[in-house]
Image: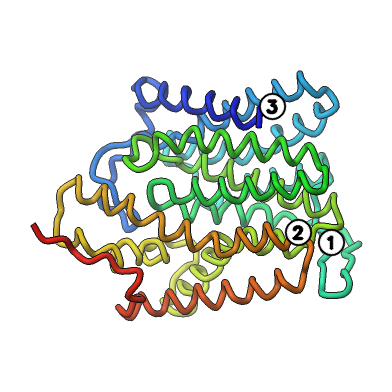
């Protein structure tokens, strides 16, 4: 837990510094209140990824000092993550780095991880056997798409205060737990570092939203999450590949479903942003008690009340993944159950038939 605490304290203090010092976030204020995915009513710094990255780097240096055997692994992981982080943080400051360029930079980071960390998808587990993937032409693109896809997926679910942060913290703690079970100390320490740094940021992001994660934070955390999940599964054959699939299924399926919806239902580009992600629908159609009020306080409360629905929903995957991390057939069943539940819930909310237990009725004064 030492790595978690160091990252947490460093991130909390650095995030407070960023919030208070206008010189650090001046060019990176999010003052666009009218975009299709915007649900805030005041200017907010969107460079929360900067203190998170710095806290992880500091904690990594301390970990290397305490355990020199980790030097090569830790430095290689940081070098790869810098590439993914850079595209996002430059976008946060300038607004001039397209989604495609950010994705390409994250793919480069995954490519570097393939060679520096040997982070590659080289097998797929099934119920009674495993399919080896020995060919470079297959494992290389599959690995790059998987890691970059998860990084992009975390950016997509980063729509409300605390949503992406809590979801990824739960996933990282799951990785740390399973790494402890298989005695993989590098993944354990790295996962706790990133979880601690994200938690330090979270205390300033939820419920009020004094700072946003931004593209830099989302791509950095998403890349680290994807890379560490891949390393844990491939370095430890006793951990099923379906553990990683179920653990990451919420952001991954959200991304795939959104691309399908935009392309085949709405006839638009899959990269075109819209306001009908699952979390957006829950915000607009389920959190009803404040509907009709337009003041900033009501909007902020609706924002903070939306995330817990998705936290609970993501735990439908994280908890069974953590419990059944070595049992492929159980994990496969839970993957099917999650996908079915997601589509059922989405369709119900789109048709204004949200389950009764989800609805918060409007309060009357």
Which quarter of the rendering shows the N terminus? top right
Residue 351 x/y as whole percent = 33, 81
Q: CA distance from mark 3 to mark 1?
A: 33 Å
Q: Which residue is mark 1?
A: 137
Tell which tag, 3 or 1, sits nearer the viewer. Answer: 3
Disc 1 and disc 2 in contact, CB within 8 angstroms: yes
Instruction: For label 1, count other residues whose C-alpha is less than 10 Å away and answer few (under 14), some (14-19) or many (20+).
Output: few
Q: Is residue 49 above or below residue 13?
A: below
Relative to 37, 250 lies left or right: right
Q: Is residue 211 above or below residue 249?
A: above
Q: CA distance from mark 1 to mark 2?
A: 7 Å
Query: How many numbered circles are shown?
Result: 3
Q: Is residue 89 above or below residue 21?
A: below
Tell which tag, 3 or 2, sits nearer the viewer. Answer: 3
Instruction: For label 3, count other residues whose C-alpha is less than 10 Å away and answer few (under 14), some (14-19) or many (20+).
Output: many
Q: Which residue is mark 3?
A: 60
In the picture, the disc for residue 141 is 2
**Residue name at image x 28 percent, y 37 percent:** 43
């Amino acid at each position: 837990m030492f790595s978690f605490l160091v990252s947490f304290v460093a991130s909390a203090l650095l995030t407070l510094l960023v919030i208070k010092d206008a010189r650090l976030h001046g060019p990176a204020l999010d003052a666009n209140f009218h975009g299709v995915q915007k649900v805030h009513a005041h200017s907010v710094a969107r460079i929360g990824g900067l203190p998170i990255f710095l806290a992880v780097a500091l904690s990594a240096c301390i970990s290397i000092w305490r355990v020199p055997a980790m030097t090569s692994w830790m430095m290689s992981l940081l070098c790869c993550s810098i590439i993914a982080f850079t595209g996002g943080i430059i976008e946060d400051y300038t607004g001039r780095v397209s989604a495609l360029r950010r994705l390409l930079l994250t793919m480069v980071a995954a490519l570097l991880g393939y060679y520096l960390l040997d982070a590659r998808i080289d097998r797929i587990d099934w119920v009674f056997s495993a399919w080896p993937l020995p060919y470079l032409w297959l494992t290389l693109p599959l690995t790059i798409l998987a890691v970059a896809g998860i990084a992009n997926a975390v950016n997509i679910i980063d729509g409300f205060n605390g949503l992406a942060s809590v979801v990824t913290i739960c996933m990282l703690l799951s990785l740390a737990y399973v790494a402890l079970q298989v005695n993989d100390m590098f993944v354990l320490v790295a996962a706790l570092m990133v979880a601690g740094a994200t938690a330090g940021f979270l205390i300033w992001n939820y419920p009020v939203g004094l700072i946003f994660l931004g593209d830099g934070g989302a791509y950095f955390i998403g890349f680290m999450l994807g890379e560490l999940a891949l390393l844990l599964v491939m370095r430890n054959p006793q951990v099923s590949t379906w553990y990683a699939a179920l653990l990451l299924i919420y952001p991954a399926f959200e991304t795939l479903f959104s691309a399908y919806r935009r392309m085949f239902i709405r006839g638009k580009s899959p990269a075109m942003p819209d306001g009908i992600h699952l979390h957006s629908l829950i915000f607009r159609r389920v959190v009803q008690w404040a509907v009709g009020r337009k003041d900033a306080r009501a909007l902020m409360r609706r924002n903070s009340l939306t995330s817990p629905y998705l936290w609970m929903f993501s735990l439908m995957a994280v908890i069974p993944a953590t419990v059944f991390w070595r049992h492929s057939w159980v994990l496969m069943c839970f993957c099917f159950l999650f996908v079915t539940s997601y589509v059922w819930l989405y369709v119900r909310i789109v048709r204004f038939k949200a389950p009764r237990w989800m609805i918060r009725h409007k309060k009357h004064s």
